[in-house]
Image (cartoon, helix red, strand yellow):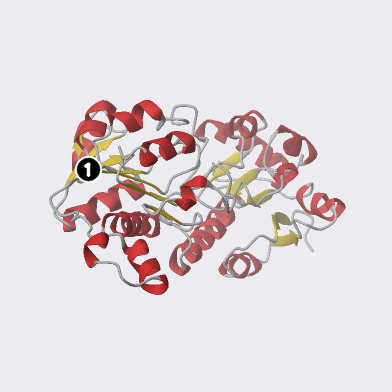
Amino acid sequence: MAANIKRVGRLDLWLDPIFNERLNAQPDIELRSAAHKGPETDVWDVLSRAHVYQVSSAINELPTPYQVRPGLLQRCPSLLCVSAGGAGLDTVDIEACTRAGVAVVNQSGANAQSVAELAFGLILAVARKISLSDHLLRTARGFPRERLMGTEIGGSTLGLIGIGNTGARAAAIATGFGMRVLAVDPYLRADEIRSRGAEPADFATLLGAANLISVHCPLDAGTRGMFGAPAFAAMKPGAIFVTTARGGIHDEAALLAALTSGHLGGAGLDVWDVEPPPLDHPLLALPNVVATFHTAGVTHQARKKLATWAADQIVQVLRGERPPRLVNPQVWPAFAARYAAALGGGNG
């Protein structure tokens, strides 16, 4: 085996097999895996020698010691790049990686269509009371169909919180239903929001105008707790709240209060503070809440695309080439120097 073999390390959390297939086809790349519930010595033997760490984005599935924080970076001096398994970077301290000269890449956009589709699945399930109808039809008799009377979404106003890869696809789906679409996104100019199929709006205007709100923004310091009691109170009476983004953007206790008071008409929730939520979580007891287990991006197509993109980016990085989804571009000069010292050359 060549002296400058390029090493990729990962844990045994589920990843589409195409990831291994693509990397194993590269003669100068050695892919090693360790059991995330196995002996720590085995895990650190893999990670401490890796040039690239393929890390899960699922913070509730990945043991804390193996999340990319300063402690892990200190134990992995050979690490040149961290590749997140999805668009989210909950398990990666980007600033710490940048300080250490470690490039961070993600697979932003790979699961956008799947997430947008589930967001609309939740919207329809809540608005048309699909889950409640299914439950009653299986468990009860003697109730009138009018108990299951829902609301058409055509002609209503959808408010999007974020109109990036996923939000733009949600806007396109909404247009097909004949909905008016408003969007708030601090990272985009008004003309760009319009080009993605929505009318730009500020947060307060969107809250007051939307019949349905769907969240498609990342969880960060600016969005944590964005939907608390004041935001829910500002929404239209009877409005529906849907999120396929991240737990923590909405306050679960405040949402429960807005639903039980009757102010909001329902909610569709794919993400939670703790995943999965406990069985006795009060939101799960409400008939106007449709709940899923962070599965918006979990489709065969999305998972295969995520794994393919991740493998292809890793190959590029290990050639010294700048990858297309580099999260911390300011790291590139430091990365290039470290790459040259460790593996030689590069195409910066």
Q: Does 235 sit left or right of 331 as displayed?
A: left
**As rendered, which of 285 and 326 lies closer to the eye?**
285
Q: Does 216 sit left or right of 50 as displayed?
A: left
- Residue 195, located in which quarter of the rendered image? top left
Quarter that holds the C terminus: top right
Residue farthest to the front, as pictured: 142
Q: Residue at x 57, y 41 (%)?
A: 90
| Residue 178 percent location from the top left of the image | 13, 54
Q: Residue at x 73, y 37 (%)?
A: 73
The answer to whether residue 33 is seen in the rendering is yes
- 10 Å neighbourhood of mark 1: few (<14), some, or many (≥20)? many
**As rendered, which of 146 and 236 lies closer to the eye?**
146
Q: Does 58 sit left or right of 213 as displayed?
A: right
Residue placed under numbered mark 1 in the picture: 211
Quarter that holds the N terminus: bottom right
The answer to whether residue 322 is seen in the rendering is no
| Residue 66 percent location from the top left of the image | 72, 46
Where 100 falls versus 43 (above or below)?
above
- Residue 98, located in which quarter of the rendered image? top right
Where 43 falls versus 203 (above or below)?
below
| Residue 121 percent location from the top left of the image | 33, 60
Q: How many marks?
A: 1
Q: Residue at x 87, y 51 (%)?
A: 41
Label 1 element class: loop
> Label 1 is placed on what type of residue?
Asn
Q: Does 200 sit left or right of 287 as displayed?
A: left
| Residue 225 percent location from the top left of the image | 46, 30
Where 176 falls versus 231 (above or below)?
below
